[in-house]
Amino acid sequence: APSIPGVQHVGGSMLESVPSADAVFIKTVLHNWDDEHCRQILRNCRKALPPNGRVIITEMVIDETNL
């Protein structure tokens, strides 16, 4: 990923832990996991954030009627 001022890219498994941050940005990740794994990822995000922290999630929306 490109270097962006004020952003730190961190590798690892979100199923194990998420490093502390003011915000966590998750892009096109959750659709790959079942509900229990998604809950674990989001729990780990919550543990990593301060009370006013934010989780930002982006996923693609597909209109299945046009497939």
Image (spheres, rainbow, N blue to C red):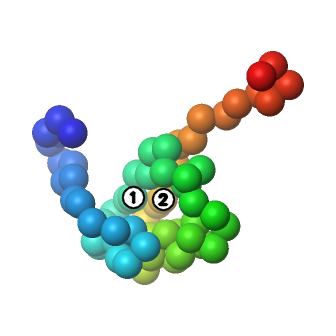
What residue is at 29 percent from the left and 72 percent from the top? 20
What residue is at 37 percent from the left and 78 percent from the top? 16
Secondary structure, mark 1, is strand
Q: Is residue 20 left or right of residue 6?
A: right
Quadrant occupied by the C terminus = top right
CB atoms of marks 1 and 2 within 8 Å: yes
Q: Is residue 33 left or right of residue 44?
A: right
Rendered image: mark on residue 43: none
Q: Is residue 2 left or right of residue 32?
A: left
Q: Quadrant of residue 64?
A: top right
In the image as oriented, which residue stretches furthest toward the top? 66
Q: Position of residue 43 (x, y in %)?
A: 52, 76
Residue for badge 1: 24
What residue is at 43 percent from the left and 65 percent from the top? 53
Secondary structure, mark 2, is strand
Residue type, label 2: Val
Give neighbour class at mark 2: few <14, some 14-19, many 20+ (Cα, 10 Å). Answer: some
Q: Position of residue 6 (x, y in %)?
A: 18, 48
Residue for badge 2: 55
Using the image, determine if residue 65 lies above or below residue 46: above
Q: Kindly tell me whether residue 34 is visible in this rendering.
A: yes
In the image as oriented, which residue stretches furthest toward the right? 65
Give neighbour class at mark 1: few <14, some 14-19, many 20+ (Cα, 10 Å). Answer: some
Q: CA distance from mark 1 to mark 2?
A: 5 Å
Q: Position of residue 34 (x, y in %)?
A: 64, 64
Using the image, determine if residue 61 lies above or below residue 31: above
